[in-house]
Amino acid sequence: MATSSSVEAEQKFDAVESTPLPTLETIDGVGRVGEPVSHTLEATYFDTRQLALARHGITLRRRTGGHDAGWHLKLPLGPGKRTEIHAPLGSEDVVPTELMDRVLAYTRANAVSVVATLHTERTSYALYGGHGERVADFVDDHVRANVTLGEAHELQWREWEVELAASDGKGDALLADLTHQLSSVGATPSKRSSKLATALGGQWPTPGKAEEKKDKKAAKTEASVPVLSYLRTQLAGLLLQDAHVRLHRDDSVHQLRAYTRRIRSVLHSYREIFEPEPVAGLEQGLKSLAETLGRYRDTEVLHEHLRASLDELPEELVLGPLHAELEERMEVRADTAKAAIQARLTSPHYFRLLDDLEAFIDTPPLTEKAKAPARKATAKLVNKAVKRLHKRHDAAVAAAVGHSRDEAFHNVRKAAKKMRFAAAAAESVHGKRAAKLGKAAHNVQSILGTRQDSVMARRELLDLGSAAGAGSAAFTYGVLYAVEGTASDAAQRKYLKKSAKVLKLRLKK
């Protein structure tokens, strides 16, 4: 089923039946107003009985009438903006699979069903700029809602809406200007997020509002505030990326794994401000998820690395159909890893992990240390992560050449990641200094990532060479093994050259 997506930028206004239409021609930036166009619209809204989609600012509906009849899924993008995904009308009570795939991380094991049906008599006016271009649409809606969630009821209201014709950022000033001028003639910018929110009234969830107010009030006093804010942002990213994995988007597994690791790392670095048992449970679940995602991601990275290495060799040194053998070997491994991911992302264990993460962030099990001054407490814990990096560095430098040293430098890389994410969680408190520390840690992580890629490539090449026996392919694998050894040594020298400055960085308390 074909789908399409767009970004909408709009502003709603409250209006009563007696409110006269504004004189749209007098609004700055509007050169001409089109003739009114009327439509009768019927929209059926779907959600879980717990309003899981609404809780995350997501709207799922099927609408008939008007120019954009079909299924609409609206995902939050920013203040006044949402990404809208369209699908054809299809069946009236079966949500298209691609749309459901985008929201499974929110609905989880809960079924979606009709929560309300809205009938709208709409009159719209196209607004054109000075050069005849369509810049926005003004809409006058008379709405009648039939709510089926909870105790069934019906209500009616009127609202206006201004929506930009194109949401490319250039029209944001126009939308602000239209909002200001409509307000000046008596229109009231609406606080409602959607028609469905109006229809559901007191049943409509208001996620995170209390936490947001607390965040602003306590931003410079409580250690837990910047950490929870960071975790909240990372979890939101994880939930959005979940859909990209289900839709097989490029780089999506990597991104989902990255969000998983950030959350786990910050929980670990700041664990003393939380009760230990919940943190331990989340860390274990996140580690297991990252490992499942990692089997595919590691295969993906290794495949790209070996393919590039083969491509860089002179043709006369590539003996045999090595490209084809590599493609076949990696494809089998990737398919197995993908199947494991698909099973994992539909498992009760995964959905329970998401439930637990949301519950943890919404009602965090804080210790007394969570109330400590944010600047001092976060500096202490970030600096502790730097000390951990220093300790791993010393162990790597002292390690014997071979497997032990490879593992030791890999541990340095993991410590650099923890340091980077710990610093990122403290940026709202420490600003540029935390950002500088995080950037330095990322640089170290990247250099040692190059070294680790070569280590993994050598291990794979050793297996390939052994399987090739005394054949000509073994020669090529041997050449590549030597090349990777040189690359690994170069990355190690680069790290040692830059590490001294990084290890001296600290946050001021």
Image (tube, rainbow, N blue to C red):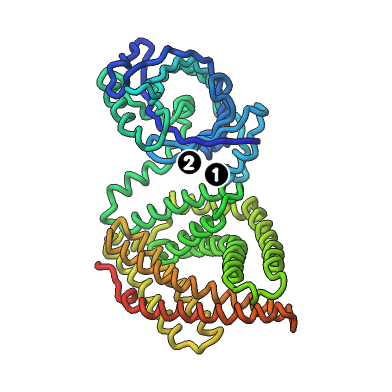
Front one among 469 and 22:
469
Disc 2 on helix, strand or loop?
Answer: loop
Asked whether residue 225 appears in the rendered view, the answer is yes
Q: Are marks 1 and 2 in contact (CB under 8 Å)?
A: yes
Asked whether residue 147 appears in the rendered view, the answer is no
Alpha carbon of mark 1 to alpha carbon of mark 2: how far? 8 Å
Q: Earlier in the sequence, mark 1 or mark 2?
A: 2
Q: Which residue lies furthest to the front in this view?
A: 316
Three-letter amino acid code of the residue under disc 1: Tyr
Disc 1 on helix, strand or loop?
Answer: helix
Left or right: residue 327 versus residue 388 is: right
Residue drawn at (53%, 15%), measured in percent from left and top? 40
Quarter of the N terminus within the rendering: top right
Left or right: residue 171 versus residue 197 is: left
Quarter-of-image position of residue 66: top right
On screen, 85 above or below 239? above
Quarter of the C terminus within the rendering: bottom left
Q: Residue 56 carries which label?
A: 2
Label 2 neighbour load within 10 Å: few <14, some 14-19, many 20+:
some
Residue drawn at (51%, 34%), measured in percent from left and top? 59
On screen, 430 above or below 208? below
x then y, percent, for residue 483: 55, 79
Front one among 268 and 97:
97
Left or right: residue 60 versus residue 15 is: right
Residue drawn at (66%, 28%), measured in percent from left and top? 90
Q: Residue 18 carries which label?
A: none
Residue drawn at (50%, 52%), measured in percent from left and top? 238
Three-letter amino acid code of the residue under disc 2: His
Which residue is denoted by mark 1 in the rendering? 106
